[in-house]
Image (cartoon, helix red, strand yellow):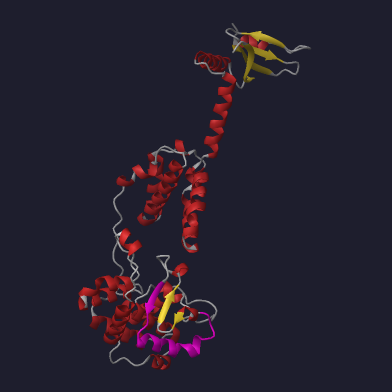
Amino acid sequence: MLTDTAIRKAKPRDKQYKLYDERGLHLLVRPNGSRLWHYRYMFEGKEKTLSIGPYPEVSLAEARSARDSARADLRAGLNPAITKKLRRAQVAAEQNNTLEAAGRDWFALISPTWRPRHAASVLDSLERLVFPRLGAMPLRDITPQMVRDAVVDIEQARAPEIARRVRQRISAIYIHAIACGKAEGDPAGVIKAAFAPVQTRPQPAIIDLPGLREMLRAVDATPAHAVTRMAIRWLALTAARPGEVRLATWADIDGDEWVIPAERAKTHRAHTVPLSRQALDVLEAVRPITGGSPYIFPGARWALRPMSENALSYLLNRAGYAGRHVPHGFRASFSSIMNERSPADRAVIDLMLAHVPSNRVEGVYNRARHMARRKFLAQDWADILLEDFPPAAELLFLPRR
């Protein structure tokens, strides 16, 4: 049997030679001084040689362990050389099957169904908060504790809501990997119960008609860019989402309807908003100012760009409604007041708000538009909201900022 001392004392010769251990293991000493472990065995009646690795990178004990593993393969009827190749392939696959690789595969698959801004936000959160910490690790090596520690750090450094979304995205990556046969479990899914649910609060909104009308009068009395003031009135009349109002274009208007295209709708489905006489009045009043822009409500400085994301909020705040009403709150105002006024029209009111039905089957099969009723409700809403208010054209002559 070989010893480490004998191996270290072995000198290179003009020709390579072997130092034998036992059970087929030997060390090949080459003229250049390199030393390689080999295991010689018989398989299916033929002599074969398995290369184990160089000495001293592979110690004597490790070489004997590799030989014993190869002998176990032989007893199982397997060729050790083939088994070694399969193990190497498996290791290579594991190294390429990292969380980052799986995450980018998942993102490439799912992101085309998202709006570009949301897709960019998701990828940014993975690249900043997940990949630097866990991205290089094979999927099978990541434990629930590792994911939990990462999510807790995000929660403490940033916000519970961001941490919750990151955990959901890691879980989605694993679910995709499981479906592709690249993972067996979802460590981000099993820790969901380890976190307290995020307490969400409704966005501030005035939901009584007198209070809402008082707020609109305060907005009209607040010095502001005329287009911003017009946009607030349009937002209140249509109960659309603020982002949809900001990006509304003249090309979206079709008679007395505003057709929000699918790519700009939160639900990814085109949505038609019936326009009351008062909403059409806003269009006619603002057209001389913004008719040369693609946007109905462009920014104050650049006519070819949409209004700033914060313009509507800033106007409400200056009017004295900070923390009491936000642009998105007009949707709650419309829903609350009109559902109380016309409770039998709850489903139609939800349709006007482009709410997705909780019953998915209903959402797929019930495509009734109820446009006549929607137009009636839109006009009723405008009449009670702006009763005794001046026409939109007079907003142009109110104090400017």
Q: Nearer the viewer, residue 337 or 400?
A: 337
Residue at image position (50%, 79%) is: 251
| Rendered position, 38 above or below 136 | above
Q: Nearer the viewer, residue 173 or 223?
A: 173
Furthest toward the right, the residue is 14
The answer to whether any part of residue 225 appears in the image is no
Q: Residue 202, position in %: x, y?
A: 29, 66
Answer with the quarter of the image where residue 383 lies: bottom left
Of residues 81 and 269, the one drawn nearer to the viewer in this rendering? 269
| Near-viewer residue (123 or 258) | 258
Classify residue 140 by image quadrant.
top left
Question: Which part of the image, by quadrant, shows the N terminus?
Answer: top right
Give, as a single range, the part of the protein colored magenta: 271-294
Q: Residue furthest top?
A: 1
Above or below, 191 relative to 310: above
Quarter of the image where the C terminus is located: bottom left
Image location of residue 374, percent across then percent down = 31, 78
Q: Is residue 30 above or below residue 109?
A: above
The image shows residue 186 at horizontal and vertical percentages of 39, 41
| 281 magenta-colored | yes
Q: In the rendered structure, does residue 109 fall within the stretch colored magenta?
A: no
* Residue in the picture at 31% in, 75% down: 370
Quadrant in the picture for residue 225 = bottom left
The answer to whether residue 50 is seen in the rendering is: yes
Coordinates of residue 290 in the picture (x, y in percent): 50, 85
- Total residue callouts: 0
Q: Is residue 257 left or right of residue 321?
A: right
Q: In the figure, is residue 233 to the left or right of 251? A: left
